[in-house]
Image (tube, rainbow, N blue to C red):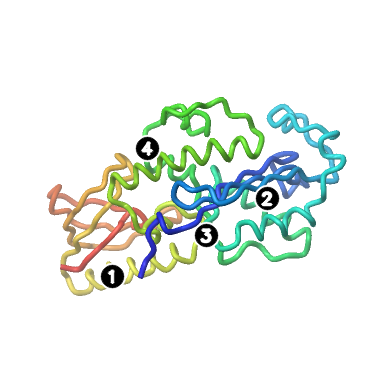
Amino acid sequence: MSKKISEVEFTIFDTETTGLDPKAGDRIVEIAGIRLKGEEIKSTFQALINPGREISEAAFAVNKITPQMLEEAPGIDIVLPQFLDFIQGSCLCSYNAGFDLEFLNNELKLIGRPALENTTVVDILKMARKLLPHEERYALWFIADKLGLKSGQLHRALADVEMTREVFRKFQAMLTAKDIFDYEQFTNLFAISSGFSHNLLGQKIASIQEAIDAGVKLKIKYLSGSSAQVSEREVFPKEIRQENGRKYLVGFCCLRQAERTFRIDGILHLQIV
């Protein structure tokens, strides 16, 4: 039986780095996280890390972390195993999670550990783009301001995690208002790394293909990428199409009386009728 979002423990995390490119030798200098379940904060993690290299001028201009602050800080070989213990069993969330995940996996490689596996990683920036599709920009401070939260992003890991947690809470309330409670649906919509997401997408594709082969109609519940509205549609499926790495259902929509295209990862539920 699928879990509800409210039953899952999440870790909101953030990193500060010496620069923007781990492939060019940039390293993590600070990592922080807040582990929570529902409204309850379970625990907090924060650590400075001596990266063994200088912080770029551009990075210092953002995070204000000085070499003196890092002189007595432990190395990544000490901090990262502690962080892995901290996040164990939780859904990992970050704003622009691809950036943080690339740095984490690079640091894991440097200490001789495998990349993160069997860990669901949700991108809260992806949530912002899907739930607030018409904003002119998506910086964390800007989205926080749009949601009526105190902004003033500090670009220190724990402070940014606090702001991200508040944004995440607002987005959870928006999902509740759209009757989206299921954790697998949630990861299907917003995860960038998830076994759940991959399996659910495969199940949807199989059901759509079954309906195409049988020439029958599908009833779908759909989160629109253009309006962020949830609607129920009846569709005669025509084909499954792939464009730019995404899969789409193309079919005749009975509601619109026209052919329409639906992103399959935006389909919350489907049923052959």
At label 1, which amino acid type do we have?
A: Ser
Name the foreground residue: 184 vs 54: 184
Residue that mark 1 sits on: 207
- Going by the numbered disc 3, the residue's amino acid type is Thr
Residue drawn at x 52%, y 39% is 164
Q: Which residue is disc 2 drawn over? A: 103
- Distance of mark 1 from mark 2, alpha carbons? 37 Å
Q: Tags 3 and 1 in contact by the CB under 8 Å rule?
A: no
Q: Residues within 10 Å of mark 3 (few under 14, many from 20)?
A: many
Which sits earlier in the primary sequence, circle 4 or circle 3? 3
Location of mark 3 (residue): 120
Residue kind at label 2, given as amino acid type: Phe
The CA span between labels 4 and 3 is 24 Å
With 239 as the anchor, is 183 left or right in this view?
A: right
State the CA–CA distance, disc 3 to disc 2.
16 Å
Q: Which element carries disc 3, helix, strand or loop?
A: loop
**Amino acid type shown at disc 4:** Pro
Look at discs 3 and 1 and give the one toward the viewer.
3
Residue 225 placed where, x, y %? Answer: 34, 44
Q: Earlier in the sequence, mark 3 or mark 1?
A: 3
Q: CA distance from mark 3 to mark 1?
A: 24 Å
Disc on res. 133:
4
